[in-house]
Structure formats: structure tokens, C-alpha cells
Amino acid sequence: MGLLVLVVAVWSLLAPASFVWIDTWAINPMLGVIMFGMGLTLSPHDLKIVLSRPKDILLGCLAQFTVMPLLAWCLTWAFSLPKELALGVILVGCCPGGTASNVITYLAKGDLALSVGMTATSTLLAPILTPLLVWLMAGTMVDVDTWGMLQSIVYVVIAPIVAGLLCQRFLSKMTTRVVPYLPAVSSIAIALVVGIVVSHTADKLWAGGMLVVLVVMAHNLLGLAIGFLLGTLFRLSKPKCVAVSIEVGMQNSGLASSLAVLHFAAFPLATIPGAIFSVWHNISGALVAKLYQRIFPSSSAT
């Protein structure tokens, strides 16, 4: 997926016309497809994980909704980013974990059950926490429509997940046939989201994208490192530390771009950090999975 996203990102940057004909409104349906797939793959067992391991899930979600928003705010201040770009970085930091983190955790031989539980929990908390955090971090820069953002996240994220769960419950035979194809569908949808956002902001990326690229990379890498450090400080097992690291560092950046398009249309540059993060965290995720495999070869996914 990292390679696919990178190819699409470079293609849409060098030849924006290839994707610019797809309007930005298409981002939401594509995110809905990804979330619908998540709903199809969630099971009662995942709920049991959340209920049976509240300490691990609570630690992971607290880290998710504190480390990344605070890092975003600190980086925008340290690098004196313009208001529009700062808003985009903060949006990324305040979003829940991305579903790609589950794949990366599996590849890294981390605690897959914990990763799935954290993703599901942070996603369900996002309608409340994401608008609130954006308002706290960016409310002094721009007007933040917290109620509108809550509604958008419910429509784009929660409703498709619920629809997927209902299909799994009442159309189990069809779901069983469809599930093997979901990784490919989700990868294509993520790549298309990246292509749309990058193509629509290509000229701005060429004009001043290097600084924000560095900020986005630092945001992701610091999140990965601090997530692992927190797991170590709380004496979690190495597979759990790996899962917390990846969950904290990898964000639902497609949602960040979508919220920027829907609620901050007056600040078009706000979509750029989400686009860059979508590309970079898939690449860094694949690299960190290899790194964790080498450092903890005896760890196994649980």
C-alpha cells in the first residue's frame, strides 16, 4: 500500500490533470468505503478485547488524543507555520488512528488485537474528541464549527462502520465472500484520496511544500517514538509497545483532509498536511515494521 500511495502521490503531483477532474467531494464517499470495510471486519471478539483489556486500550487512546494533538501544536509553533498550514497539521493531530495501522502492526509482529481495539475505540470517540481538540488547538486562529465537524465525522466514519456491522450481522454469507477483497479495495480508496488531494493542491505543494513535509515527517516519527516510550514506561510487553507506537504515530489523515475541505474551504492550504501525511505514514509505517521485526524478532502478534 505504501508503494501504491507513493506512486499515486508522485503521479498526481507531476501530472495533476490525471486526478484533478475528480472533485474533492469524492473524498467523503471513499473514506466511507474504507470505514464500511472496517465495520465488515469488526467482530464481537473485538468488543471483548476492548472490555477485557481496558487498561491497555485506555492508555493507547489517551496517548492517541494527547500526544499527537500536542505535538502538532508544538511543531506549528516551533516552525512558525502560516495559519492555513498550521490548521492542517492540527487537524491531522486531532484525528483518530488510521485503519492502515492494523496492517502495519501485523507486519511488525505487534499486538494486533490491541491495535484493532485501539483503532475501533479512538474512531468511536472521534466525533466528540476531534472537534473539541481542534477547537482547543486552533480556535484562536480560525472559527471552528465543532457541531458541524461532529456531524461530518458521524456521517463519514461512524455511519459506514455501523452499516458494515449490520451487513456482517444480517448478510453474513455475502460478507464472508467480500472480506478477502477489502484490503485491496481500501488500498485503492486510500490511494485515490491521496491523488485527489495532491492534484488539487499541486501548485501550492510546489510553491512551499518542503517545510510542511518536514513538519509532517517529524510529527509522525515523534508520534511513533513517544508511543513506544509510553508503552515502555508503563511496562507493557514489547508486542504491546509496538502496537501503541504504531497506533499513536499513524493517523486517519484522509479524514483530516476531508474535514479541511468541508469546514475550512476558506483555507485551501489546510488540506496539504493531510495529503502529505497520507503518503508519508504509509511509507514510514512499512519501514518501522521492518525495524521492529529486526529489534524484536522473538515477538509474536497476539
Image: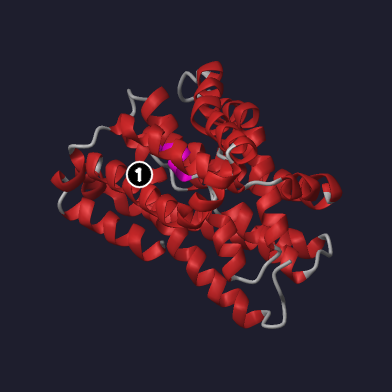
Q: Can residue 83 be seen in this view?
A: no
Would you name the residue on which mark 1 appears?
193
Relative to 4, say whether 290 is above or below.
below
Of the pair 134 and 43, the residue shown nearer to us = 43
Which contiguous range is marked in magenta? 253-257
Percent across and percent down for residue 198 are 28, 46
At label 1, the amino acid type is Val
Percent across and percent down for residue 300 are 71, 74
Of the pair 144 and 256, the residue shown nearer to us = 256
Relative to 133, say whether 93 is above or below.
below
Q: Can residue 261 be seen in this view?
A: yes
> What SS does tag 1 mark?
helix
In the visual, does 133 lie left or right of 261? Answer: right
Question: Which quadrant would residue 108 be assigned to in this image?
Answer: bottom right
Image point 50% across, 57% down: which residue? 180
Image point 34% across, 48% down: which residue? 194
Image point 67% across, 55% down: which residue? 115
- Residue 246 on the magenta segment: no
In the visual, does 1 lie left or right of 203? Answer: right
Quick one: quadrant of the N terminus? bottom left
Percent across and percent down for residue 32 are 46, 36
Relative to 205, say whether 237 is above or below.
below
Q: Pointer 1: residues within 10 angstroms few (<14), some, or many (20+)?
A: many
- Marks counted in the figure total 1
Q: Main secondary structure of the magenta part?
A: helix
In the visual, does 230 lie left or right of 175? Answer: right
Image point 67% across, 67% down: which residue? 110
Relative to 2, say whether 116 is above or below.
above
